[in-house]
Image (tube, helix red, strand yellow):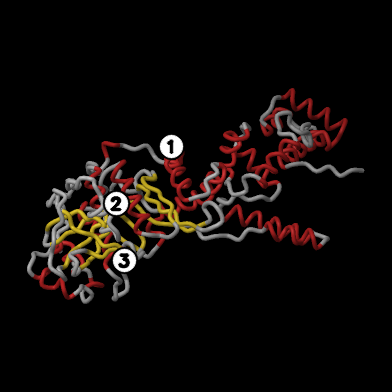
């Protein structure tokens, strides 16, 4: 005789009816216990007398619901996940199915189908990972073949540490968290994704790909912030060389990225706060977790294989990401200051380098000879060994600050374009050059005062600037 197994609620009904029949008890009391009518009690008594314990098994047990997915459809979903979207988490996978495959299913349906095959989401919690791990270990103990054991071992997922949460800032633009993450974002080589995220809303306010974590990458996202939003109150970053210098002996000033980025932020009035604890800037750390599970797949679907293509794709993806994940922006609670002019942004996000005038009245910079030119297009000659600052603006234009005056720089070619003796063309008139206004803080004394105020540069400032610095009022 086949053994009948009942569930808890079915077992309870069976015991109440059995006791009622055996003792000829009160039907109204039994109906009160089971929360049903006297008529239903009579029906259960008749069923118990005819079928016994088996009557209390629910009629739908073992029957597949009419609205459930077919086995073929489940297999298609699993194949799509394993072969086309293996990097996606379950929520992202559902969005991609609807967007690219025209398949609309709920996240719960996808999760159940994949979890039945012991496929865990990349964003699964430690509890879920541990549950699946224990299930796989139990299957491994029951496995009979070596092939089956190896297949189970490959599916066991190691648990990972999670980042603790921190309160959001009160105002939009009050704190911008910045960081860079190296990964195989696209193509076959690793690249660095520079990201800036607003701590109040979680919105991405700047993003840029580069081969390394560089000053250029952070200047580009700062350019996006200044152009699209304005001047934020504070940057919160890790202690990278770009933001905080640890070693006492510094490189040349143009290679000292901490000095360059810090000076640009000083001119804009942006505070910089650094930390060596990743959990302190958990907003941007968790953002990278989300992007690492979504962005490589999105870049692959968009056929972005170069830095130029990836950076162009970021422009549209940032809007898509912010619409999906960022909190609504309350502009009445924004502390972003007014956007600077494009000219000021271009001149502020510059790389400054210390140089000397050579015996040909030129400046040597990046293997080129450059001649200072005034606003009327005429060259200006200074004595040999006169100290100066070369300014490379964000768009690549070159200027020089000499004796607290700013000049444009023209490259001196190796050969004349036309011969003075054999050319019959009329001499070209000097072309007026754009020279930034003197109000811009590119004065030699102010920049070198900023350099001297830093601990790692106290003994590293070139001696030829000592007299210039001491004769001017310090900015720090």
- Label 2 and label 3: CA atoms lie apart by 16 Å
Say whether residue 340 is left or right of residue 236: left
Report which residue position mark 3 lands on: 255
Residue 221 position (above or below residue 252): above
Q: At 30% across and 66% down in the image, what residue appears? A: 256
Q: In the rendered image, is residue 374 in sight?
A: yes
Say whether residue 53 is left or right of residue 200: right
For residue 5, what is the image quadrant? Answer: top right
Task: Tell me the mark number nearer the camera, choosing from 3 and 1.
Answer: 3
Q: Residue furthest top?
A: 39
Q: Nearer the viewer, residue 345 or 16?
A: 345
Say which quadrant the N terminus sits in. Answer: top right
Q: Residue furthest right?
A: 1
Q: Point out which mark residue 390 bears.
A: none
Report which residue position mark 1 lands on: 323
Report which residue position mark 2 lands on: 394
Q: Nearer the viewer, residue 287 or 305?
A: 305
């Amino acid at each position: 005789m086949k053994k009948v197994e009942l569930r808890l609620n079915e077992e309870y009904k069976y015991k109440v009816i059995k006791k009622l029949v055996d003792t000829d008890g009160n039907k109204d009391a039994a109906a009160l216990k089971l929360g049903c009518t006297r008529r239903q009690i009579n029906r259960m008594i008749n069923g118990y007398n005819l079928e016994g314990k088996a009557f209390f098994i629910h009629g739908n047990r073992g029957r597949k619901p009419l609205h459930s997915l077919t086995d073929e459809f489940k297999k298609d979903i699993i194949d799509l996940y394993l072969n086309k979207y293996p990097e996606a988490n379950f929520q992202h996978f559902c969005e991609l199915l609807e967007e690219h495959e025209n398949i609309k299913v709920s996240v719960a349906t996808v999760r159940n189908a994949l979890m039945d095959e012991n496929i865990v989401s990349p964003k699964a919690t430690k509890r879920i990972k541990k549950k699946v791990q224990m299930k796989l270990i139990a299957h491994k103990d029951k496995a009979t073949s070596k092939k089956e054991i190896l297949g189970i071992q490959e599916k066991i997922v190691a648990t990972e540490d999670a980042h603790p949460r921190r309160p959001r800032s009160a105002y939009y633009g009050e704190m911008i968290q910045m960081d860079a993450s190296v990964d195989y974002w696209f193509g076959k080589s690793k690249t660095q994704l520079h990201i800036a995220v607003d701590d109040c809303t979680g919105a991405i306010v700047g993003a840029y790909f580069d081969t390394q974590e560089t000053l250029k990458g952070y200047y580009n996202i700062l350019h996006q912030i200044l152009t699209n939003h304005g001047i934020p109150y504070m940057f919160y970053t890790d202690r990278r060389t770009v933001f905080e210098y640890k070693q006492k002996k510094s490189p040349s000033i143009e290679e000292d990225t901490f000095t360059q980025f810090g000076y640009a932020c000083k001119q804009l009035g942006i505070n910089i706060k650094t930390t060596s604890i990743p959990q302190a800037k958990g907003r941007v750390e968790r953002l990278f977790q989300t992007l690492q599970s979504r962005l490589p797949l999105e870049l692959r679907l968009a056929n972005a294989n170069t830095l130029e293509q990836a950076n162009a794709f970021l422009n549209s993806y940032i809007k898509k990401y912010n619409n999906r994940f960022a909190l609504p922006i309350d502009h009445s609670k924004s502390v972003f200051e007014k956007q600077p002019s494009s000219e000021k942004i271009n001149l502020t996000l510059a790389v400054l380098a210390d140089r000397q005038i050579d015996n040909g009245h030129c400046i040597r910079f990046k293997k080129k000879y450059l001649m200072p030119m005034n606003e009327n297009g005429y060259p200006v000659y200074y004595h040999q060994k006169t100290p100066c600052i070369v300014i490379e603006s964000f768009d690549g234009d070159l200027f020089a600050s000499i004796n607290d005056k700013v000049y444009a720089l023209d490259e001196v070619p190796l050969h004349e374009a036309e011969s003075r003796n054999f050319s019959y063309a009329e001499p070209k008139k000097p072309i007026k050059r754009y020279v930034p206004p003197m109000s811009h803080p590119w004065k030699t004394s102010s920049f070198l005062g900023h350099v001297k105020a830093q601990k790692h540069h106290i003994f590293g400032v070139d001696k030829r600037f000592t007299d210039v610095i001491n004769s001017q009022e310090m900015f720090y």
